[in-house]
Image (cartoon, rainbow, N blue to C red):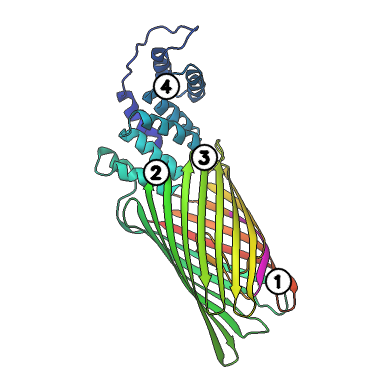
Amino acid sequence: MQKTLLKILLPALFLFGSFGPAKAEALSLELADSLSYQYYLAADWDQLLVLGKQAQKEGIDFKYLQQRLGYACFMQKQYYKSIRHYQQALKFDPQDKLTQLYLYYNGLNTGMRSFARYYAGKLAKTDFEQYTEDSGFRPLDAIDVEYSYKLAAHNQRDNANYQRFGINTFLTYQLSLYQSVSRFRQRSDQVNLSKQNEYYALLGWTPLQRLSFGLAYHYVDTKVLLGEDVYPYPGHVFLGKMDFWHQRLLFSLSASDFRNDYVRSSQLAAHLGLGFAGANNIYLKSSLFRVFENRVDLGSSGGRFIFKQTAGIMLFDKIWTEASVNVGNLDNFVDLDGLYIYNSLDRSTFRSGLSTYWYINKHWTFYLNYTYDTKNIVLYNEFYTQQSITGGLLWKL
């Protein structure tokens, strides 16, 4: 539907120039209008984009040209470039619904859901609303489940497992609420059982097309069983974040605070993401964290840095692959907008992972992850490796 809709609607965007014969020696606004329309009708996207570059050099620019260039990039799956052209078209006519619709489609195709829903809100209660798959209030937008099995290469550590269940709700076009419950279990020689039940909630708000905010709360109910004795360590994580998009660039700031009766860990982070043009949708994201920790038994440990690098690429249609690496002391590390808190028995000092997402259809996504950790038993200063296999399923209603 995304590909055919503009074919239906754009002919109605009649030309305001003539269809007269072209003059090879100069490009006028009228000629650029005529040629771009002809290339569009012929689906000659390469020639259309070449014409766009020539028009830019000549200082020629108008709404329909940017729309046609945006659609050419869209058809070539260069979604970030398509966004740029449609945003230029929007400068000529901020209320143009066709432009807003393709910004919505590009948001979906680049995984920027809040960006897409911002424009879906612009199309609400118009004739174009039928071409979107969003509504303002969706009490049950999506459900996801996740299971992880962790293999510890140490004779004093049993294998661990982790389960999670999440629900996403859209309160309005610009306001979302994600909630999740999870549990973690692991045995060791030192303790009979270490278990943790968790609740997580993230409230997201997108007041502007390029700006969003998030507030998260994560409750951590940690219990350590030693014989007949149970030692509870309930904890709380509070997180705030801000995301700003500019064309293919994403800049984010976040701050979190994790505390229980024995430790307080505060975390500041800056994130920089960049999406590259092309059909493979290559994406890079670098994150630098500064962690300040204060323990009841050890006092303040000062600050430490953690670096995380993520790279993603769509090698095959509907299959997205992402690799990541974390360097630094990950004890009590808060990651992915506060969804994960790494406060297990032994801290990780290095983590790398590879994930694959298979977009089966518009309702179902399956993902598989492999993670390799270097773990440190602080009491003995021993190191061992842990390998994790995680599978998950997302059902979009």
Question: Label 2 to label 1, Cα distance in Å?
Answer: 44 Å
Question: Mark 3 or 1 closer to N-term?
Answer: 3
Q: Secondary structure at mark 1?
A: strand
Question: Label 3 to label 1, Cα distance in Å?
Answer: 38 Å
- How many neighbours does mark 1 have within 10 angstroms: few (below 14), some (14-19), or many (20 or more)? many
Question: Label 4 to label 2, Cα distance in Å?
Answer: 23 Å
Question: Label 1 to label 4, Cα distance in Å?
Answer: 60 Å
Residue at point 49%, 34% (across, down): 81
Residue for badge 3: 248
Along the viewing direction, whichever of 281 and 214 lies nearer the viewer: 214
Question: Label 3 to label 4, Cα distance in Å?
Answer: 21 Å
Q: Is residue 309 above or below residue 209?
A: below
Residue at point 61%, 86% (across, down): 192
Question: Mark 4 or 2 closer to N-term?
Answer: 4
Residue for badge 4: 61
Q: Amino acid at mark 3?
A: Arg
Task: Tell me where residue 345 sits by quadrant.
Answer: bottom right
Q: Secondary structure at mark 3?
A: loop
Residue for badge 1: 376
Along the horizontal axis of the image, is 235 left or right of 295?
A: left
Question: Label 2 to label 3, Cα distance in Å?
Answer: 14 Å
Q: Is residue 388 in the magenta section?
A: no
Residue 214 on image: x %, y %: 43, 57
Q: Which residues are magenta?
A: 346-355
* Labels 2 & 1 near each other (Cβ < 8 A): no
Residue 271 on image: x %, y %: 55, 51
> Total of numbered circles in the picture?
4
* Labels 4 & 2 near each other (Cβ < 8 A): no
